[in-house]
Image (spheres, grey):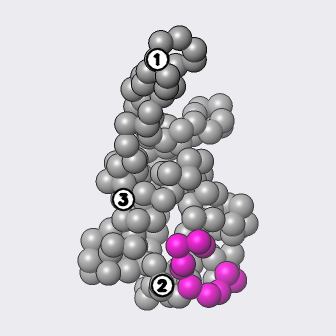
Amino acid sequence: MKVSQVVGAVVGTIAAVIAVNVVGNLVFGLATPNGSRAMPIKTAYAAVPPAGGAGGATAVADAGPPDPVKLTAICKTCHSLDKGGANKVGPALWGVVGRPVASMAGFGYSDAVKKLGGAWTEERLDQWLTSPKNFAPGTKMSFQGYADPAQRKAVIGLLVSMK
């Protein structure tokens, strides 16, 4: 294989990964073209009559907790969520809760993540999923985070169940 073919394959792979990330962020509402943050998944609300009868302001009730399967669709563009899954652009996430940070064999972590030390607890995952770039400045992870605490809780709940 010629050097130009190898370089072309590497450049093509990098371009494809970037394109998947950009399209995924736009499709799932994590970033808008102007860079502003949007809510990843819209929560449906149903009108509920106010307590005490008619009149007054109308209250709303949440239609239920966010769906972690839908929320993790963006994760799957870079991570495997399968038991025994291989590393992809990001490390495999099965068993991440309780695992030492930057410990997935065969994955090249950024220095920013290596410096974190400790283990992935639910609290640390909540901070990470809020904003990876704020939690570990210099990380290579391009995901902007989940602004909604209920969404983070749903994703972390799914990760906790992966043992």
Question: Which of pointers 3 and 2 indicates the residue nearer the eye?
Answer: 2
Query: Magenta span has 154?
Result: no
Question: Which of pointers 3 and 1 indicates the residue nearer the eye?
Answer: 1
Mark 1 vs mark 2, CA separation in Å: 49 Å
Magenta residues, as a range? 115-124
What residue is pinned by disc 2?
98
| 1 on left or right of 120 | left
**Dot 3 crowding, Cα within 10 Å, few <14, some 14–19, many 20+:** some
In this rendering, is residue 34 above or below 101? above
Q: Main secondary structure of the magenta part?
A: loop
Query: Magenta span has 117?
Result: yes
Which one is nearer the viewer's eye here, 144 or 23? 144
On residue 53, which mark appears?
Answer: 1
Residue 91 rendering spot, x and y as whole percentages: 44, 74
Residue at 39% of width from left, 73% of height from top? 160
What residue is pinned by disc 3?
76
Which one is nearer the viewer's eye here, 110 or 115? 115
Mark 3 vs mark 2, CA separation in Å: 20 Å
Outermost residue on the front side: it is 52
Q: Are marks 3 and 2 in contact (CB under 8 Å)?
A: no
Q: Amino acid at mark 3?
A: Lys
Outermost residue on the left side: it is 83
Q: Secondary structure at mark 3?
A: helix
